[in-house]
């Protein structure tokens, strides 16, 4: 996928290009280290640099909003654990076969697994919904390795230089990959209509999403996975990969299939299930994301309308 920087200012292009060079260099050097040492080393490096990038501040802000009862010592621990998990996850994606081998060895549990098998036996399409928890590519790599042909929907990164090789690494695990947008959605729906499986990471802020409850606060959330499941009569099944205590292995957990009702009810059930899992493993969710942002004001004739 070619880099498109035509709409970026020179300053933005220079910043993205420099950041990409740095990340590529770090990941390239990390590749020289054995896998079992590389993953924790990159987790440590990202956590060490996280304060400079404002990541610890963002984690603290989200925790103060949603979990103000947490003691300071626990907040400090989570800042480190969250950033370490982010570094480990990025390194794992770039590790290639050693990561895929770990994913294939991951045990699978949970009632949603039987729902997946039943849907496949019936030739029914499946929407697997997941989040930025543990490492969300583990379940995809495992299921593809078990013979489940699977597509995935992804959101293009702001840094176009990094985005292109990041997508190539995801494609190395399995294809097709559908970029969020009109064309990608058309291709994704076509894949579902053919009885396929798609995986969607659905825990990001979506400006045009619905205000649903997540950790006791209103969070704008996409109802697209539920809408697609309803329109295509697809099974909607949440699946997550829990990082184990050794920091290298995972357990894949399938939550119960979401019954068909309406998009908001179904999506709220997804949010509730993810929140319950996060509360069991607080350091494994990506608290760095700006999950509880307010909506952008609408535009009229190219101008933003001031928010109330």
Image (spheres, helix red, strand yellow):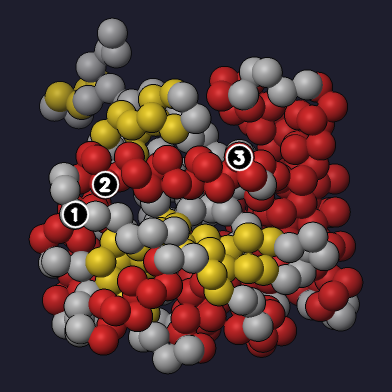
- Going from the N terminus, do you reach mark 2 or mark 3 first? 2
The residue carrying pointer 1 sits among few (fewer than 14), some (14 to 19) or many (20 or more) residues within 10 Å by Cα, namely some
Nearer the observer, 305 or 60? 60
| Rendering quarter of residue 50 | top right
Q: Which residue is mark 3?
A: 279
The residue carrying pointer 2 sits among few (fewer than 14), some (14 to 19) or many (20 or more) residues within 10 Å by Cα, namely many
The local secondary structure at tag 2 comes to: helix
Q: Please tell me which residue is depicted at 57% across the width and 20% down the height of the picture.
A: 65
Q: Which residue is mark 2?
A: 266
Farthest residue, direction left: 231
- Going from the N terminus, do you reach mark 2 or mark 1 first? 1
Instruction: Name the spot of residue 186 as percent of width and height, x first.
Output: 17, 67
Residue 260 is labelled as 1
Q: Please tell me which residue is depicted at 63% across the width and 77% down the height of the picture.
A: 106
Q: Please tell me which residue is depicted at 34% across the width and 44% down the height of the picture.
A: 269
| Rendering quarter of residue 2 | bottom left
Image check: 271 left or right of 93? Answer: left
- Going from the N terminus, do you reach mark 1 or mark 3 first? 1
Instruction: Name the spot of residue 263 as percent of width and height, x first.
Output: 20, 45
| Residue 26 in view, yes or no | no
Q: How many marks can you see? A: 3
Nearer the observer, 128 or 51? 128
- Per the model, the C-alpha gap separating discs 2 and 1 is 7 Å
């Amino acid at each position: 996928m070619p880099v498109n920087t035509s709409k970026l200012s020179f300053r933005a292009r220079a910043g993205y290009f420099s950041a990409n060079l740095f990340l590529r260099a770090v990941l390239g050097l990390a590749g020289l280290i054995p896998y079992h040492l590389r993953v924790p080393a990159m987790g440590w490096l990202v956590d060490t640099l996280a304060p400079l990038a404002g990541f610890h501040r963002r984690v603290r802000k989200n925790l103060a909003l949603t979990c103000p009862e947490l003691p300071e010592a626990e907040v400090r621990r989570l800042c480190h654990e969250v950033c370490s998990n982010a570094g480990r996850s990025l390194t794992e994606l770039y590790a290639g076969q050693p990561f895929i081998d770990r994913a294939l060895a991951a045990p699978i549990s949970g009632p949603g697994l039987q729902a997946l098998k039943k849907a496949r036996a019936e030739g029914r399409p499946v929407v697997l919904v997941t989040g930025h928890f543990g490492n969300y590519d583990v379940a995809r790599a495992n299921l593809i390795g078990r013979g489940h042909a699977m597509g995935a929907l992804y959101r293009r990164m702001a840094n176009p230089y990094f985005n292109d090789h990041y997508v190539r690494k995801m494609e190395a695990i399995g294809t097709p990959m559908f970029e969020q947008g009109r064309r990608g959605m058309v291709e994704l729906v076509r894949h579902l209509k053919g009885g396929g499986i798609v995986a969607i990471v659905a825990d990001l802020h979506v400006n045009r999403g619905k205000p649903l409850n997540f950790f006791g606060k209103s969070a704008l959330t996409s109802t697209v996975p539920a809408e697609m499941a309803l329109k295509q009569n697809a099974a909607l099944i949440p699946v997550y990969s829990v990082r184990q205590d050794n920091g290298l292995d995972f357990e894949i957990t399938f939550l119960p299939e979401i019954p068909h009702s309406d998009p908001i009810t179904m999506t709220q059930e997804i949010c509730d299930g993810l929140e319950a899992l996060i509360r069991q493993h607080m350091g494994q969710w990506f608290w760095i994301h700006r999950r509880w942002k307010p909506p952008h004001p609408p535009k009229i004739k190219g101008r933003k309308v001031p928010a109330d």
